[in-house]
Image (cartoon, helix red, strand yellow):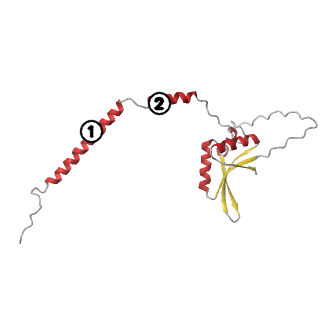
Amino acid sequence: MSSNTGNRSAAPGKGGNQLITGILIGMVAGVSLAAGVAWFLKNSPSPFTKKEQAAVSTLKDAAPYTQPAAAASGVGSNKPRFEFYKVLTDKQDATVAAPAKPAEKPRAADSKPAAAFEPQVLQAGSFSNEADAEKLKARLALLGFEAGVQAAAIPDKGVWYRVRLGPYKAADEMNNARNFLKQNGVESTPMRAQ
């Protein structure tokens, strides 16, 4: 019988030692290189400092943004914005005061009374999935509006979730809110408050 000695190495453990040594040398070189780059970046001047200072100065010069529909968020209305205080303590929030009623203008004897504006709400969406309604409610909250989700059972269609804002007691207040929503990509429909 012949022995097969064709491609065997003379030192069986030498290849494994070289592999481990190579890995260790590579790791040390990589860590050294990373430390050098970090030190260089830390000590070099930032190329963004001039741009950042210019951007800050232009932002300071710009006029501050004011939301046209401030009353749509519940501020200045009779209804408190949050009701958790009342629910938790059974006390009315003392910081919410009723707005003063403006003095009525005297009417001429022959003039007819102006058409009264019925309180209305803005419906921003109606969804068959409650999660979609909650997403729109969150988006409206980021815009500064307090919205509510109402579930409604519709015959032959199941339960739909309506996202509504309001009620608005004045037409100009509702129109300001509606225009602001439209500018931010949210279509809304006015509806009578129920």
The CA distance from mark 1 to mark 2 is 32 Å
Determine which quarter of the picture holds residue 152. bottom right
Task: Residue 42: give x, y in percent of width and height.
Answer: 36, 32
Q: Do labels 1 and 2 touch, CB within 8 Å?
A: no
- Quarter the N terminus occupies: bottom left
Q: Point out which mark residue 15 bears.
A: none
Q: 157 or 96: nearer the eye?
A: 157
Mark 2, secondary structure of its residue:
helix
The residue indicated by pointer 1 is 32
* Residue 31 occupies quadrant: top left
Q: Amino acid at mark 2?
A: Lys
Task: Point out residue 2 in the picture as x, y percentages from the top left corner.
Answer: 6, 70
On screen, residue 63 above or below 152? above
Residue beneath the point at 22% across and 46% down: 24
Seen at 77% across and 34% down, the residue is 100
Graded by Cα atoms within 10 Å as few (under 14), some (14 to 19) or many (20 or more), the crowding at tag 2 reads few
User: Extreme bottom residue here?
Assistant: 1
From the top left corner, tell me how far across and down residue 7 is, in percent.
12, 61
Examine the rendered structure and indicate whether residue 127 appears above or below residue 172: below
Query: Is 132 or 49 nearer to us in this picture?
Result: 49
1 vs 2, front mark: 2
Q: Amino acid at mark 1?
A: Ser
Residue 80 visible in the snapshot? no
34 vs 15: above or below: above
Taking depth in this image into account, of 35 and 58 the one nearest to the observer is 58
The kind of secondary structure element at disc 1 is: helix
Say which residue appears at 76% left-offset and 42% top-offset.
171
Location of mark 2 (residue): 51
